[in-house]
Image: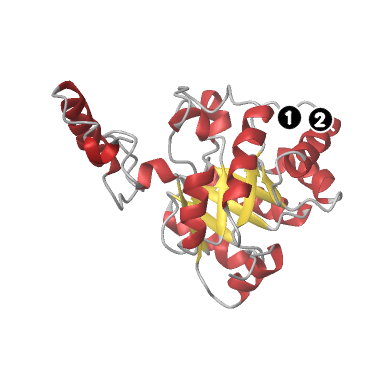
């Protein structure tokens, strides 16, 4: 398989090819997704919620992202790996932002980083990109801003808010980002931004017209319970599969059916 690079991602937009993106947090899953041809794997701070059980992404640390990124990098051959910069790793100062971005590349093995925020974070994007570290932006519904937004709510429903998000996206592109996530915004707004920007847009809850789409792997595999956001399409029900397998294991052990002779030395 040919290794995917940031140049390939830019070319996909130029050629009108849709860009599939999935989150990954471990070696085994990364290997499977890579074999399936997923071109971009995002080591998201969503790991804090779907893997560690936090209520928000806010407690996730740089060390935790580095741990997950190392595992994902070892599992993939072709996919381009992007690591999230968790809350607090880039907001306090440009020095913090640069230092933590370097850690995710140097210690984690990521090939790019992602950070949230629009115009207020443009200077941070510019500072990191100036170190030749590819930066993926993220505007609209930004989970690290959950307290300011009053929850995980669709952003940009009225024209004034939509214009703000549009300007945020333009600022992140101008600052040097190679791509941008549009999360939780009306489809029409996402279409307008996608048509205006030269860099690829990756949608999540942003309609069909973005250049690419990203989902949290646990959501699309049915591992996160019955309540999922409207934008999630479930491609499997691994919750039920694992439940049935574990139940059968418990029954076999309790009844002395496992291990049998064929499973013994």
Q: Spatial distance from mark 2 to mark 1, Cα to Cα?
A: 8 Å
Q: Secondary structure at mark 2?
A: helix
In the rendered image, the quadrant that contains the C terminus is top left
Please tell me whether residue 240 is drawn above or below residue 253 in the rendered image: below
Q: In the shown orientation, is residue 140 left or right of residue 105?
A: left
- Of circles 2 and 1, which is in front? 2
Q: In the shown orientation, is residue 101 left or right of residue 149?
A: right
Residue 211 got which mark? none
- Asked if residue 119 shows in the view, the reply is yes
In the picture as drawn, the residue positioned furthest to the bottom comes out as 15
Residue 68 position within the rendered picture, expressed as x and y whole percent measured from the top left: 59, 37
Identify the residue position indicated by label 1 in the image.
Answer: 91
How packed mark 1 is, by other alpha carbons closer than 10 Å (few <14, some 14-19, many 20 or more), is some
- Asked if residue 163 shows in the view, the reply is no
Q: Quadrant of residue 179?
A: bottom right
Contact (CB < 8 A) between labels 2 and 1?
A: yes
Residue 21 position within the rendered picture, expressed as x and y whole percent measured from the top left: 51, 55
Please tell me whether residue 252 is drawn above or below residue 213 in the rendered image: above
Q: Secondary structure at mark 1?
A: loop
In the picture as drawn, the residue positioned furthest to the left comes out as 255
Residue drawn at the location 42% of the way across and 49% of the way down:
205
In the picture as drawn, the residue positioned furthest to the front comes out as 265
Residue drawn at the location 80% of the way across and 42% of the way down:
123
Residue drawn at the location 58% of the way across and 78% of the way down:
15
Residue 93 position within the rendered picture, expressed as x and y whole percent measured from the top left: 82, 29
How packed mark 2 is, by other alpha carbons closer than 10 Å (few <14, some 14-19, many 20 or more), is some
Colour scheme of this structure image?
Answer: secondary structure
Identify the residue position indicated by label 2 in the image.
Answer: 96
State the residue in front, 239 or 203: 239
Please tell me whether residue 49 is drawn above or below residue 233 in the rendered image: above
């Amino acid at each position: 398989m040919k290794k995917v690079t940031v140049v390939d991602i830019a070319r996909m937009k130029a050629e009108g090819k849709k860009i599939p993106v999935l989150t990954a947090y471990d070696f085994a899953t990364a290997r499977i997704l890579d074999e399936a041809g997923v071109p971009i794997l995002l080591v998201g701070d969503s790991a804090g919620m779907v893997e560690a059980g936090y209520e928000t992404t806010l407690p996730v640390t740089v060390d935790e992202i580095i741990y997950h990124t190392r595992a994902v990098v070892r599992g993939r051959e072709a996919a381009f790996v992007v690591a999230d910069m968790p809350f607090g790793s880039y907001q306090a100062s440009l020095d913090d932002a640069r230092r933590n971005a370097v850690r995710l590349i140097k210690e984690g093995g990521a090939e790019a980083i992602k950070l949230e925020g629009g115009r207020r974070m443009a200077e941070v994007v510019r500072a990191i990109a100036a170190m030749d570290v590819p930066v993926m932006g993220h505007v609209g519904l930004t989970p690290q801003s959950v307290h300011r937004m009053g929850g995980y709510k669709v952003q940009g429903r009225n024209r004034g808010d939509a214009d703000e998000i549009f300007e945020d996206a333009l600022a992140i592109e101008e600052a040097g980002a190679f791509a941008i996530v549009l999360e939780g915004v009306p489809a029409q707004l996402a279409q307008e931004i996608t048509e205006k920007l030269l860099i690829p847009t990756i949608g999540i809850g942003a309609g069909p017209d973005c250049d690419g789409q990203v989902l949290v792997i646990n959501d699309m595999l049915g591992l996160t319970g019955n309540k999922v956001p409207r934008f999630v399409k479930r491609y499997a029900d691994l919750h039920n599969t694992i439940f049935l397998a574990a139940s059968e294991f418990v029954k076999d052990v309790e009844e002395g059916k496992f291990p049998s002779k064929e499973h013994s030395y």
